[in-house]
Image (cartoon, helix red, strand yellow):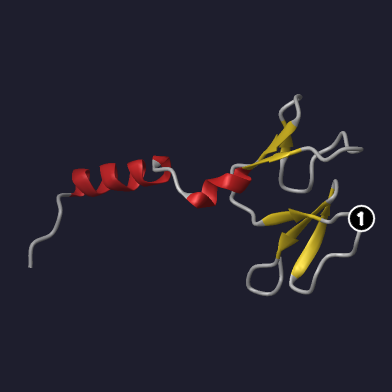
Amino acid sequence: MRTLPLSLTAVLLAVAPLIPSSALAQKRIPKLPGYDECPLGYVNDLKQHCNSPIYYEVKPTAGKACDSGWMNIGAGYCKKKTLGIF
């Protein structure tokens, strides 16, 4: 069995996060009307968006409680729980 050289493996691992995917869509979310802060896990870009280095699946609460399997992270957003805890 042939294996890749260590340097080639390192390059492939370093480039993988740079490849666009649909998962990158919620690393940057808009601030919702009426909120000046960002939800938990996001950083204010001092404009109209919030950014996170980690992908979170989020959705606006629309003023209602979060659905089952989702948790309120503030600023009008709910985050999908992963592994049933966070």
Q: Position of residue 80 (x, y in %)?
A: 70, 64
| Crowd around label 1: few <14 · some 14–19 · many ≥20 (10 Å) | few
Image quarter where the C terminus lies is bottom right
Q: Quadrant of residue 31?
A: top right
Label count reads 1
Give the residue furthest to the top: 46
x and y, in percent, of residue 24 in the image: 53, 46
Q: Amino acid at mark 1?
A: Gly
Q: Secondary structure at mark 1?
A: loop
Q: Residue 2 placed where, x, y %? A: 8, 62
Would you say 73 lies left or right of 12 here? right
Left or right: where 75 falls relative to 12: right
Q: Which residue is mark 1?
A: 63
Q: Residue at x 76, y 29 (%)?
A: 48
Please name the residue shown 20% across and 45% down the image.
8
The correct choice, above or below, for 69 with respect to 20 in the image is below
Residue 35: image quadrant is top right
Counting from the top left corner in percent of width and height, residue 20 is at 43, 43
Residue with the most extreme left position:
1
